[in-house]
């Protein structure tokens, strides 16, 4: 019993659409679960009924990420009417192939390194151009990490590999997928919200939040407000009542009221169910200091909204200081042009790169909050009863959603410049990014303080600028092998990456790996860094411009580079 390559129905099976080149082999969808099954057998667990031999997507994660990376134009894409508009994937003409490697978690996370490696091997065999890998967790040594090893082999075969940075932020050093051959993607917000406000009676307080629900508060009236801790049931812990966990609220105190709970970093849907079951009519979840200004939109079973830490304090102060506090929750509305945006998502995993501080990660950030994309009809990812409404698109949030945005762009660049290496594609994406938001101010983090390269790497992606970067910092598989050698891996560890490889007698200085960003971990007095640039733009002269980090002076030699022909390479020295 092993992974049986399964072909799913694709465009050429049932359409005579001339826009598809049906002479080319259709790859379709495959699944890989040999590793998962072997592990379960090793601990004497027989195959669970939830583990079905099929590439079918029951959780919806793969469908959402794949349709973000590629997919044709779809008019009137929306979720329960919100976010309505024409949707498309990043590379709308790309063909897609799905490699399912994750299974329902039993005794351990459901994505096994061996299955991931098998999928990489198949994708290399299928000659795909770009892989979008919305998986994270592997942050051990690269020789021990299925994603890092598989990605290395893919990059060696000219395939660009894009991975999610992980959702373990905002703690520093929380990154996954830090290998230098991977494009590591963090998440930021977009300029669309599903806005739902709290109106406070007899004041002009209007608190902006986000959520959507299938019902709204009836009547033109206000409802009593209560803080969940003031509605604690006798036997519940204070902490559980703060977060409105199951059985923590006293129905006598909650009946007919809007309850204010503190967001517990999990789904607010459960909070809504708890409030509803205790007889409440509405829910406000307020962030704590750690999640700050960061809000993502979720559906709810009752009229609800999710507000920032600062706004939550305003609301709590009003409730605390008022004899009979009253409020209302407005009907959700899709709003566009939200400022500021992008803002860093609080959950996006942050640098520094603990494994190689010399390689700055993440590389780039892309939209990863409230992303509307396709879902699988095989499951109900929305998590609430929506009656007989049909849901084809759904809002999801995570670095998983940011990753395929970059993969789509990498696909477009690959189509425009088939001769660019994966490193050149990454360089173009990174060197053309922006660190400014739509108010022309520095991109901020979820606290609205200025973000740093440990949050966003080179910044927020600008796809149109990436088409024409002028110069690129290129890297070859041999450069990556020399990097691995410099980590001091022994021969069996090196064998994960390549057949016998002779390491250079003197290990390379990792700071000089020709990466499109520069990180100097322990800058004492001075450091000398070298980069090589390759001209992929017009023939002409490039002039160095330096914006020095505070407290550091930077000199670059030469200060001008003249390219008489196209692909000439020149070295730069930074002191
Ligand atoms: C699994 O079952 C076999 C046979 O009953 C037994 O020898 C082995 O110790 C069991 N392994 C575990 C991990 O429980
Ligand atoms: C979405 O927008 C289209 C075009 O404006 C419109 O025809 C359609 O009714 C809208 N759908 C919803 C659910 O609002
Ligand atoms: C309360 O909000 C609802 C929509 O959810 C609205 O219909 C109603 O008019 C509002 N009431 C007041 C007093 O503003
Ligand atoms: C607390 O009491 C309620 C009934 O008032 C009950 O439903 C609930 O299970 C109890 N919770 C715990 C943790 O014992
Ligand atoms: C608090 O909530 C957790 C999770 O629902 C539950 O396991 C625990 O029993 C609760 N504690 C109390 C004291 O209610
Ligand atoms: C509300 O008042 C209670 C005591 O009456 C206090 O413990 C709590 O910190 C106050 N909350 C806010 C947000 O002011
Ligand atoms: C926001 O500020 C708090 C308190 O200073 C800090 O603990 C938290 O990490 C910050 N969050 C972000 C996303 O920067
Ligand atoms: C390489 O190191 C690992 C871990 O220390 C060890 O298990 C392995 O035997 C070593 N291989 C060689 C060829 O030294």
Image (spheres, grey):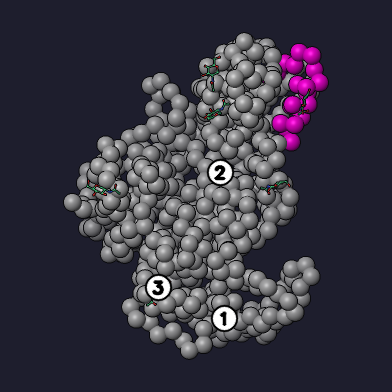
Q: Quadrant of ligand 5?
A: top right
Mark with earlier residue (2, 3): 2
Q: Is residue 7 shown above or below 249?
A: below
Of the two numbered discs 1 and 2 on the same chain, state the one appearing first in sequence.
Answer: 2
Q: Which of the two marks, 1 or 2, is nearer to us in this view?
A: 1
> Is label 2 in a helix, a strand or a loop?
loop
Q: Is mark 2 within 8 Å of ligand 7?
A: no
Instruction: Please state the horizontal and vertical placement of residue 461, each as a whole percent of the image.
Output: 57, 57
Q: Viewer-proximal residue, 456 or 332?
A: 456
What residue would you read off at disc 1?
509
What is the x, y in percent for residue 330? Answer: 64, 22
Q: Relative to the observer, which residue lies in front, 297 or 119?
A: 119
Q: Earlier in the sequence, mark 3 or mark 1?
A: 3
Q: Is residue 57 left or right of residue 350?
A: left
Q: Is residue 425 visible?
A: no
| Residue designated by label 2 | 369
Say which element carries label 1: loop
313 or 86: nearer the eye? Answer: 313
The reply to whether the magenta stretch includes residue 103 is no
Label 3 CB-ligand 8 distance < 8 A: yes
**Quarter location, residue 142:** bottom left
**In the rendered image, which quarter is residue 473 located in?**
bottom right
Label 2 Cα neighbours within 10 Å, binned few <14 / some 14-19 / many ≥20: many
Q: Does the magenta-highlighted stretch encompass residue 328?
A: yes
Q: How many marks?
A: 3
Q: Which residue is mark 3?
A: 493
Task: State the image coordinates of residue 360 (x, y, percent, origin top left).
Answer: 59, 66
Q: Which residues are magenta?
A: 310-329
Please report the residue visible at 30 percent of the width from the left and 59 percent of the height from the top: 118
- Residue reaching furthest to the left: 1
């Amino acid at each position: 019993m092993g992974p049986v390559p399964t072909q799913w129905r694709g465009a050429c099976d049932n359409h005579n659409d001339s826009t598809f080149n049906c002479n080319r082999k259709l790859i379709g969808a495959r699944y890989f679960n040999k590793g998962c099954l072997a592990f379960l057998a090793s601990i004497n667990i027989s195959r669970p009924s939830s583990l079905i031999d099929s590439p079918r997507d029951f959780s919806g994660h793969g469908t959402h990420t794949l349709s973000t990376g590629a997919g044709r134009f779809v008019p009137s894409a929306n979720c329960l009417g919100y976010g309505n508009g024409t949707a498309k994937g990043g590379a709308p003409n790309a063909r897609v192939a799905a490699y399912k490697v994750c299974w329902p978690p039993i005794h351990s996370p459901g994505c096994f390194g061996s299955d991931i490696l098998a999928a990489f091997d198949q994708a290399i065999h299928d000659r795909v151009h770009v892989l979008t890998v919305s998986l994270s967790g592997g942050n051990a040594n690269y020789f021990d990490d299925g994603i890092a090893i598989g990605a290395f082999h893919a990059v060696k075969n000219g395939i660009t590999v894009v991975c999610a940075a992980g959702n373990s932020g905002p703690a520093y050093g929380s990154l996954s997928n830090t290998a230098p051959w991977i494009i590591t993607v963090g998440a930021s917000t977009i300029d669309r919200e599903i806005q739902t406000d709290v109106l406070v009676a007899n004041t002009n307080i209007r608190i902006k939040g986000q959520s959507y629900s299938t019902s709204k508060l009836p009547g033109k009236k206000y409802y009593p407000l209560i803080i969940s801790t003031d509605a604690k049931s006798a036997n519940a812990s204070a902490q559980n009542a703060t977060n409105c966990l199951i059985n923590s609220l006293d129905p006598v105190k909650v009946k007919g009221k809007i309850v204010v709970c503190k967001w517990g970093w999990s789904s607010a849907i459960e909070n809504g169910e708890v409030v509803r079951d205790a007889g409440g009519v509405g829910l406000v979840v307020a962030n704590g200091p750690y999640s700050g200004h960061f809000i993502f939109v979720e559906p709810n079973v009752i009229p609800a909204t999710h507000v920032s830490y600062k706004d939550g304090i305003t609301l709590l102060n009003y409730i605390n200081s008022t004899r009979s506090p009253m409020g209302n929750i407005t009907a959700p509305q899709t709003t566009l042009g939200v400022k500021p945006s992008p803002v860093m998502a609080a959950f996006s995993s942050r640098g520094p790169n603990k494994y190689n501080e010399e390689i700055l990660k993440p590389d780039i950030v892309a939209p990863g909050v409230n992303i509307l994309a396709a879902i699988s009809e095989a499951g109900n990812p929305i998590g609430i009863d929506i009656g007989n409404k049909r849901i084809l698109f759904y809002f999801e949030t995570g670095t998983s959603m940011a990753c395929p945005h970059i993969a789509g762009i990498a696909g477009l660049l690959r189509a425009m410049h088939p001769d660019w290496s994966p490193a050149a594609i990454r360089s173009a994406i990174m060197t053309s990014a922006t660190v400014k938001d739509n108010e022309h101010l520095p991109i901020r983090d979820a606290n609205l303080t200025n973000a740093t390269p440990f949050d966003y790497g080179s910044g927020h992606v600008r796809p149109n600028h990436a088409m024409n970067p002028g110069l690129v910092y290129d890297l070859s598989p041999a450069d990556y092998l020399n990097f691995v050698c410099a980590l001091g891996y022994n021969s069996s560890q090196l064998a994960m990456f390549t057949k016998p490889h002779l390491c250079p007698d003197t290990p390379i200085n990792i700071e000089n790996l020709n990466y499109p960003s520069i990180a100097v971990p322990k800058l004492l007095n001075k450091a000398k860094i070298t980069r090589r640039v390759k001209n992929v733009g017009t023939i002409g002269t490039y002039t160095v411009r330096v914006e020095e980090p505070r407290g550091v002076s930077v000199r670059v030699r030469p200060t001008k580079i003249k390219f008489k022909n196209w692909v000439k390479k020149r070295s730069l020295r930074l002191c």
